[in-house]
Amino acid sequence: MRIGIGYDSHRFQEGKTLVVGGVHIPYEMGLLAHSDGDVLCHAIMDAILGALGEGDIGKFFPDTDSQWKNAVSTDLLRTIVTLAGNRGFTIGWIDSIIITEQPKMAPYIEQMKDALSAVGLAREIISIKAKTNEKMGFVGRGEGMASQAVCLLLPR
């Protein structure tokens, strides 16, 4: 059994589409990033890669490589889920948190689970929680969004 932890954060920017957990969420801003900026997918990828001992998503999908410009993060996550399987592991549990003041994430959590299950994660092993940062820090000021995830890998 192996455990990994992941974290991601991005600042908001006008003119971008907000995508979290593979779901397009109506909001006046999106997340500034080389890819689509999906903080939840990025945190989950880092958690899986950490459990595999493979570093972070920057090693696999560097923001200096133009092929990943505007990449769809669920596609990247599918690659990492496949990697875990190819290394002889089953993903046993994903526990995650999305941290933002606005927009509210709770109405989209079930859709996020559906989107994440489409990349090869069993829906019943995905936990997603939504929290605010109680008006503290960059998240609390509404400047951006963050996410954390933990992954449990089980040998096949």
Image (cartoon, rainbow, N blue to C red):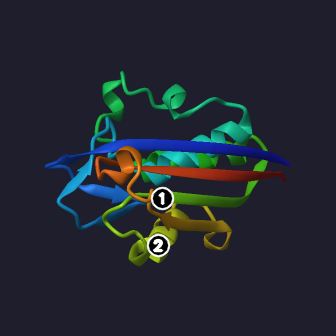
Query: What's the residue at 17%, 60% (across, down)?
Result: 28
Give the image location of residue 46, x and y in percent. Answer: 58, 41
Mark before the other along the chain sequence, 2 or 1: 1
Query: What's the residue at 53%, 26% (across, down)?
Result: 59
Residue 138, quarter of the rendered image: top left
Residue underneath mark 2:
109
Mark 2 surroundings within 10 Å by alpha-carbon count, few (fewer than 14), some (14 through 19), many (20 or more): some
Give the image location of residue 128, x and y in percent. Answer: 55, 66
Query: What's the residue at 86%, 48% (across, down)?
Result: 1
Q: Is residue 69 left or right of residue 46?
A: left
For the image, the number of numbered tags is 2
Give the structural element (helix, strand or loop) at label 2. helix
Residue underneath mark 1:
98
Mark 1 surroundings within 10 Å by alpha-carbon count, few (fewer than 14), some (14 through 19), many (20 or more): many
| Amino acid, disc 2 | Ile
Is 42 above or below relative to 18?
A: above
Camera-side residue of 53 and 28: 28
| Amino acid, disc 1 | Ile
Residue 135, quarter of the rendered image: bottom left
